[in-house]
Image (cartoon, rainbow, N blue to C red):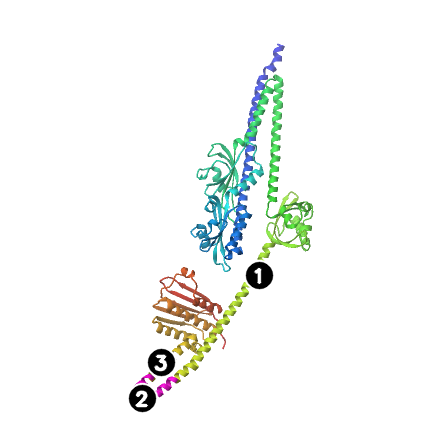
Amino acid sequence: MPDGKDSRPYASLPVIIVMFVLMTLVIGFVALQKVEQHLIAATGGSLALAAVDIADKLDRILYERYGDIQIMARAHVFQGRDAAAKITFLQTIKAAYRYYLWLGVTDAQGRIVAATDPDSIGRDQSQMGWFKTVRERGGIHVQDAQPSEASGGVMAIAFTAPILGPRGEFLGTVTSRVSLPVMEEDVIKQTVEALQIRPGPGSRIECHFLNSDGDIIANSVLYPEDQVNLKLLGLPSALLSASAQPGYIEEQHLRRHVSVVTGYASTRGYGQFSGLHWAVLVRMDRSDILAPIHAFLWKLGAAGFFVFVPMLGFLMWTTVRLRKEWASAREESTHAISAEASMHESEARTRLIVNTALDAVIVMDGEGVVKDWNPMAESIFGWSREEAVGHLLSEMVIPPQYREAHTKGLKRYLATGEGPLLNKRIEITACHRDRHEFPVELAISPLRSGEAVTFSAFVRDITERKRAEEALEKSRSEIEKNHEALRALTAQLFTAQEEERRRIARDLHDDVNQRLAAMALRLENLERALPSAPDLIREELRMIGTQVAHLSDDVHGLAYALHPMVLDELGLEVALRAYVENFAAQEGTKASFIARALPDSIPRHVTMCLYRVAQEALRNVGAHARAAEVTVTIEGLEGAITLCIADSGIGFDPVLASRQKRSLGLVSMEERVRQVNGAFSLHSRSGEGTQVFVRVPLVVETP
């Protein structure tokens, strides 16, 4: 029986082999599932990052075009009428930026007066939504992607801005069409291919842009999916892109009915540009992602079949043990390689973001030594990265007079963990390599890792902005000085006008009118002295006397119109009452005059202003209002005098009146009230009459 005893271990060998084979298969299957899940997660994360990067690039491109349209709207060339210069300017912009399909300028009526396409010049765009919106509401109008008639049906985004004159008047619009295909080509080429997220040569990546409604507006694949709304079809990634943070999801491809991994993100706008809220979907077939693993397993299985099957008993058992150990080592190696790849990928993404940042990014340790220095920092401060890294920041960018304060602030933060300049955006003075100083905007964020401290500074050169602010302030100051000079000149003009009127009225009243009265008296005496004169002579003398009397009345009326002496002699209330009564008699209109609580002494310039405003307002009532009744109310109230002229005439539409040239009389009334620091308002509605209201602050003159 020795042979039997010796064979027992070998009798159990097949069972042992089967058990180890089954265990190996189970472990291999579980490991495969884990590896597949990890690879799917890693690829999904990469796809999500690609979607975020694409969305960010789209936001940046659209933000730049948003800024372009504002700059073009303020261009001096569009303030003039030189159409050739406008076309040249637009052609230059189009040649400089390949994103533009078409640019144009309209006049205030909506007619295209300049464009990069000569065929579009002269077209009427007044009924276009973008033109109406900009003309009526002002501001920048952005139209989502749609086929552009100006560019042959190519999908384009429209930006439109108003062109305003020196006084803010609407002169027209400048509008542009930005090519969506060019944006798609640039963004996908720079992001998807640059990040190299394709696992193998046979894999393919699809990229879709959706508008806020879910319609596909651009895709990177050859087959068409136009007029497809992925949100209405219930595609999970399309729904998540609008309601969640960027991420990825496994889903079914709606057209090919295969499992895909989709990274999604949405545009959020940039700066003052709120964005178009597009969704970006970057997806890849699940089979393509797992193809390298499956290919490897097929090769491994074939090798195992031809190597391990011919082996006998104990060798197979030993091989199985070695295979288990090797599988474990391989799994650990795979995890290590994957972790290292993820770390390198994260570092590469961070470096890419820092190197492409619009601000200077400077990283400094707790000793004040520079650890990182991006290309924008090189441009702003003049020091290369090789020159800056490893040196004290204070010696390169901080002016000498501020270095001591910088050192104290750094020590204070290391001791207390507090700093007044941290985590906020401030404006300070920086120093260039050539030692000239310039203003910058600075934000500093500290990061503690155990005992180590790192500071990240984000710096932006604001020299041009400061210059623009200074120029704007200077222009405002000059405008204010000119305005004050104009007001002073207007006041002198009104004063001189009133003095001249007073002189002429006095001459007419005291000289010409007296002579006419004397002439009328002599004619009357002559008529009495000729009792026996023929009737013809007596009749002629009587007619001459009548004409002289009428002429005297006319001269008296003219003198009163130029400057009523009663205004100087008896005051504003008596003069206004007399003028209102005279108006009622001449025009046949019922006129009422109400005076309440007027002070005993009113400054002469205020008296003349209120009288002239009432005079002009009543003239307008007589000439245009067709009113049956008019009421003039003057009242002293809380250190001021108010004057109201209200009629029951036909009135007018203020909206239509604002589009017409303003009358000289209205302008004169407003300017007179402004000269005495008063407030002027006019209210009217068609069929409901007109009301002129004036309020003048009153400083009582001392006798």
| Residue carrying label 1 | 474
Label 1 amino acid? Answer: Lys
Please say whether residue 523 is one of the residues in the magenta stretch.
yes
How far across and down, in percent of the image, does residue 646 sit? 38, 67
Range of residues picked out in magenta: 519-540
Viewer-nearest of discs 1 and 2: 2
Main secondary structure of the magenta stretch: helix
Q: Earlier in the sequence, mark 3 or mark 2?
A: 2
Mark 1 and mark 2 lie on one chain; the one further toward the N terminus is: 1
The quadrant holding residue 351 is top right
Q: Is residue 604 left or right of residue 579?
A: right
Eye-nearest disc, 3 or 2: 2
Residue that lies at the very extreme toward the left in this rendered image:
535
Q: Which residue is mark 2?
A: 533
Q: CA distance from mark 3 to mark 2?
A: 21 Å
The answer to whether residue 603 is seen in the rendering is no
Q: Are marks 3 and 2 in contact (CB under 8 Å)?
A: no
**Amino acid carrying mark 3 in the image:** Gln
Q: Secondary structure at mark 2?
A: loop
Alpha carbons under labels 1 and 3: distance apart = 64 Å
Query: Residue 24 shows which numbered tag?
Result: none
The residue type indicated by label 2 comes to Ala
Tell which tag, 1 or 3, sits nearer the viewer. 3
Residue lying at 51% horizontally and 72% vertically, measured from the top left: 492
6 shown above or below 326: above
Q: Secondary structure at mark 1?
A: helix
Where is residue 429 shown, x and y percent of the image?
64, 54
Alpha carbon separation for disc pair 1 and 2:
84 Å
Which label number is shown at residue 547? 3
Circles 1 and 3: CB atoms closer than 8 Å: no
Residue 506: give x, y in percent of width and height. 44, 79
